[in-house]
Image: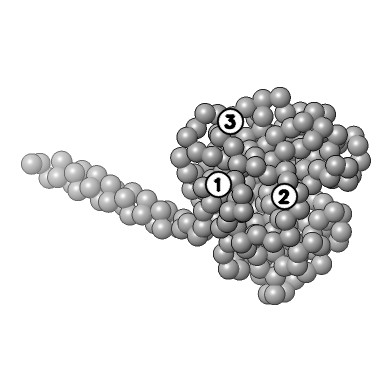
Amino acid sequence: MRPGMLSLVIAVIIAALACEDNAHVVKRKIRELWRKTKFTQGADMFSGFNAGGIIGRHAFSVVPDPAGGPDQVLRVFFPNGSYSRASPVGVVQFYAWPTGPQSALMFSYDVYFSNDFDFVRGGKLPGLWGGRTNTCSALRRAVGCFSTRFMWRSFGAGEVYAYLPEKSAWSLGRGKWYFRKGQWQNIAQYIHLNTPGSKDGYIKVFMNREQVFNVTDVTFRTDYTVNISGIFFSTFFGGKDPYWAATRDSYIYFKNFVLSTGDEAPLILS
């Protein structure tokens, strides 16, 4: 073999090995911490979540996959006319502690809006939370806590609806992605907490494994007593007035909840 050709072959082999090594590095960055993929109707519906403070238990049910898949999925029912302060109450909510405290975490799940779903003006979807419970929501000032629920807006526009020490009810990334009706879509948020005293926290959002939003210089906490505690499962229409209310009986379906490490594209379960 000619010296020039031999050098080329060696270079190709080295490059291939480097790519393989880098792939392993990326793979090692993502580590699954917890998953919830199996649902059964009844007392075991919330098993694995380590859930507390469940509101609207009657609105949850376990049903066949609306897209025809083989698994049972979690369905939430919103009555016609319901919103956050309506009667019948349209709020479905609980806090979950599936893992121990974290300083950085990826939360992903699959969500499906029924074909006839009317987005109206918007509503809340599950996200992460840290610190005190029952304080980082409902337009209260975020003291000793934070939350980063997802939210849908008119026409399905997505955003992160954040409660942070410097600002409550903060709309982040609105319209950078859109939720669709009649299909499963994977939505994920990666939260990296700031060092107390520094604005070095950040949020990444992924839709179907594609990064669609990123915000830096975020302050989630002012001291080390606040960490990522777990999942803030919160979903309802609203908004605080009837202009946000569901215009018909409506359904949202959920499956494949995953908590993992690493800020690369999230793990997606088939």
Give left or right: position of 218 versus 90.
Answer: left
Give left or right: position of 63 versus 160.
Answer: left
Tag 1 residue:
39
Residue drawn where x is 33% and y is 54% of the image: 21
Give left or right: position of 187 versus 150.
Answer: left
Q: Quadrant of residue 115?
A: top right
Viewer-nearest of labels 3 and 2?
Answer: 2
Secondary structure at numbered mark 2: helix
190 or 38, nearer to the observer: 38
Q: Position of residue 125 (x, y in %)?
A: 71, 45
Could you tell which of marks 3 and 1 lies nearer the N-terminus?
A: 1
Tag 2 residue:
57
Tag 3 near tag 2, CB within 8 Å: no
Q: Position of residue 9 (x, y in %)?
A: 18, 44
Three-letter residue code for mark 2:
Arg
Three-letter residue code for mark 3:
Pro
Three-letter residue code for mark 1:
Phe
Could you tell which of marks 3 and 2 lies nearer the N-terminus?
A: 2
Secondary structure at numbered mark 1: loop
Regarding residue 217, the answer to whether it shows in the image is: no
Q: Position of residue 107 (x, y in %)?
A: 59, 52
Regarding residue 256, the answer to whether it shows in the image is: yes
Q: Quadrant of residue 98?
A: bottom right
Check the picture and name the quadrant holding the N terminus: top left
59 or 212, nearer to the observer: 59
Disc 3 from disc 2: Cα separation: 21 Å
Tag 3 residue:
66
Q: Position of residue 134 (x, y in %)?
A: 79, 61
Vertical placement of 81 versus 217: above or below? above
